[in-house]
Structures are given as C-alpha cells and as structure tokens.
Image: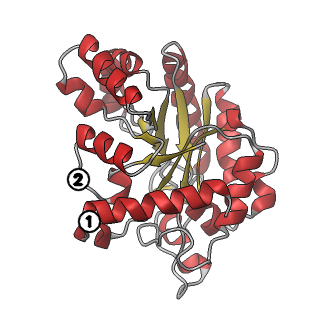
Amino acid sequence: MFSNLSAGALGLDLDLPTAVDLAAKHGFGGVDPDLGHFRSLGSTAAVREFADSVRERGLEWGMTGLPVPLDAPAEEFRRALVDLPQSLDLLTAAGVTRVGTWMRPMHDELDHRRNWRLHAGRLALVADLLADAGLRIGLEYIGPKTFWSTERFPFIHSLREARELIADSGADNVGLILDSYHWYTAGEDVSDLEGLTDADIVSVDINDARDDRERDEQQDLDRRLPFATGVIDVPGFMGAVRAADYSGPVKIEPFMKELAERPVDEVLEQISGLLDRAIAGE
C-alpha cells in the first residue's frame, strides 16, 4: 500500500499539477487523479504525457470519483452514461485504475428493498462498462447513526451490507472503500475485517473521532486526524488492512476546516508523517 495525497479530502484547494509537486516534495507515494484536469488538457495524448510525468516523479494514482451518480434521478443517470465513454478514454489514457463513490445511507421515498434493487442494477451496469476500461469501483458505506437515521428509510451503513450489495451486483471489479471512521461508527471491530483480500479493497481512509462524544453521537463531517484521540483503533484497523495484503492508496479525510487555515507545507508534512506511521504499523 502507499500513502496518498487527496487534497480535496483535506479541504485544500490545489490544482492537480500543484498537488503532484507537493506530493513528491513531502514523500507521498501517490496522488488522487482529477478528471476535470484531464479534460482541460484537450486530448488523450496530452493526458498520457502528463501521466508519464507523474510517474517519473515516483507517484502512483490514487482514486478519482465515479463519474456516474448511482442514486441520481433516471434522466441524470442516463445523461451520465452518455458522457461516460469520453471520461473513460481520459482515465484509461492516464492509467487510472480506481474510481469510487459513497452510498447515501438513507432515503425519504425508497424503502430498503427498492433502494437495494436500484443500486444493484445500476452498479452491475456501470461496473460492466468500467471493466472494459480496466477500472475498479470502490463503494463506501457511511456509518454514523446521526446521518443514516435522519430520513424515513435507512439504507446501507455497514460493511456486511456493502459486501452483500457488491455480491448481488455480480461484478468482479467492485470493491470497498474502507474508512476507519465509518468502521468505528458502524460498531465494527477487527474481526469484521478478517478474510478481506486485496481484491476486496479499492481504497482506504483513516481518521480518528472526537473523544467527547459517544459512538452514536459522532457526526460524519466532524472527525479528527488519525492517532489524535485514540477513540478509533487505527493500529488494529491498519493491521487488518495489512493482513489483507492490500496494495492500494491510503489517505486521510478528516473534514477539519482548520487545516486549510495553516501553511500547506506544514499540513502536508504532518499528514505524510501520519500516513507513514499508519502504514508501517508503528
């Protein structure tokens, strides 16, 4: 696995060339690709040239967002499918292999069964299209009860449910985005991660939680940096990730606005160090 700079996840407004420079400077192993930047380059040849320059810096690609919203209204979903081939051409030219999306863990109109059918069917369709481009899809379940309990019908908010949906889709290029925050808020522990392999995991996020709230009081967008409070067993979580022989990106996504108020180099030095610590198992 490798440490990954995801500027957006840190709340930092960096264009991709700047993020690449800073990732190389601060010892990250990878950086998240940006489909918007690829589009701005004007051609697949230019995208290949840019991607070559990133690899020459010793960096791998992390994960970019899935360009198709799985739970969108039918017309929006259809339009995204129409635009998908152009996006796939750019991602393929860049050598990107991972895209991801989070699953909204509740719905005011669709009950669990109807929402499940919607996601399973659309996931199977999109996964088939992405498989031809050599892309894997990561699905992230959202754990905090303060989020999934806010609408009429709760939906997927646990590792077990996410794995069941993936199996139901029948797609072999779909896996998990494992986030220590959602793992903790879902009430899961290391035993829930046993048996996972590299083929099951597309991306990994690590965070800590506030120590002045109980688990079911934690808010999705109010987290802490890994190892900050010890509320989340980050060493245990990462031990299970290592046991899975995971080979992909690991990033930090704390939703802490104060990071953007500090000097960027100072922030990235800290983030890189925390990732190195987590990956090494120290």
What is the number of callouts on the image?
2
Identified at 51% across, 63% down, the residue is 274
Label 2 residue SS? loop
For label 1, the crowd category at 10 Å Cα-Cα, with few meaning under 14, some 14 to 19 and many 20 or more, is few
Residue 13, numbered circle = 2
The relative height of residue 214 versus residue 75 in the rendered view (above or below) is below
Amino acid type at mark 2: Asp
Q: Nearer the viewer, residue 87 or 273?
A: 273
Chain-order first, disc 1 or disc 2? 2
Picture coordinates of residue 238 (x, y %)? 67, 56
Amino acid type at mark 1: Ala
Identified at 30% across, 31% down, the residue is 35
Label 1 residue SS? helix
Question: Dividing the picture into quarters, in which one does residue 226 lie?
Answer: bottom right
Of the 4 image quadrants, the one containing the N terminus is top right
Residue 260, numbered circle = 1
